[in-house]
Amino acid sequence: MGLAPLWRLRSRPSAAKVAAGDWIALKQAVPACTACGLHKTRTQTVFGVGDEKAQWMLIGEAPGAEEDRLGDPFVGQAGKLLDNMLAAIGLKRGENVYIANVLKCRPPGNRNPEPEEVAKCTPFLKQQISLIGPKLIIAMGRFAAQTLLASDASISSMRGRVYKYEGVPLIVTYHPAYLLRNLPDKAKSWADLVFAKRTMASL
Ligand code: SF4
């Protein structure tokens, strides 16, 4: 898959184009976006956060209630667990790590995103990947993995392999929010992080 075409905000001509390589335009375009119905129910968009030249990029599904309220991805208990997971492999949020979601607006009631919403929003994510130029992407959770890999396979069957998204090596692991509800799978997540670290060292 190549880089998505320039993103057009049809209902907001003043934010008409996000030029490739332009963080400022992208950061203006996302909060102004009304391309799908999720703009009607969001408190705010959740753009993504971290080192804009990071080698590691973590991608989750979509903002939850707390993220919608605060404007940052991976906050609350799941965010704390993510920080602990990062620390376990010698990483720290914001330092050589960038965190984003596939969708920039919260689906109401935390329902799964609709395919049309994903189609409208992924050009933003692709622009972020293009601007950051990560060496490795970690897709966190079933939805992010299935969306980025255009697959309906289970997380368990996708783990432990290196895929590519937008030309960038990608591996799959569980979402921290899932791990909070399924503590036994933490060990598998740890194995995934060790695999990620080994993969990064080989790149
Ligand atoms: Fe735009 Fe994405 Fe929000 Fe939909 S989810 S309104 S495409 S920013």
Image (cartoon, helix red, strand yellow):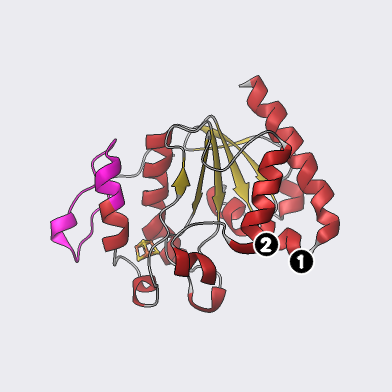
In the rendered structure, the answer to whether residue 114 lies left or right of residue 11 reads right
Tell me the crowding category of disc 2: few under 14, some 14 to 19, or many 20 or more residues within 10 angstroms, Cα based: some
Which quarter of the figure has residue 127? top left
Does the segment drawn in magenta span residue 12?
yes
Does the segment drawn in magenta span residue 147?
no
Q: Rounded to the nearest whole Å, what is the CA distance between mark 2 and mark 1?
A: 7 Å
* Circle 1: residue type: Arg
Can residue 134 be seen in the rendering of this structure? Answer: yes
Which residue does the image show at 20% across and 49% down from the upper left? 17
Q: Quadrant of the image for the N terminus?
A: top left
The local secondary structure at tag 2 comes to: helix
Measured as percent of width and height from the top left, residue 159 is found at 73, 44
In the rendered structure, the answer to whether residue 28 lies left or right of residue 179 reads left
Tell me the crowding category of disc 1: few under 14, some 14 to 19, or many 20 or more residues within 10 angstroms, Cα based: few
Q: Main secondary structure of the magenta part?
A: loop
Q: Which residue is mark 2?
A: 177
Q: Which span is picked out in magenta?
A: 7-27
The local secondary structure at tag 1 comes to: helix
Ligand 1 within 8 Å of the CB at mark 1 = no
Figure quadrant, ligand 1: bottom left
Which quarter of the figure has residue 76? bottom right
Kindly give the residue lying farthest to the right in the view shown. 184
Is residue 116 depicted above or below 25 in this figure? below
Q: Which residue is mark 1?
A: 181
Q: Tell me, yes or no, whether the two marked residues, 2 and 1, touch with CB atoms within 8 Å.
A: yes
Ligand 1 within 8 Å of the CB at mark 2 = no
Can residue 6 be seen in the rendering of this structure? Answer: no
Is residue 114 depicted above or below 101 in this figure? below
Question: Residue 15 versus residue 84: which sits nearer the camera?
Answer: 84
Kindly give the residue lying farthest to the top in the view shown. 202
Measured as percent of width and height from the top left, residue 46 is found at 42, 59
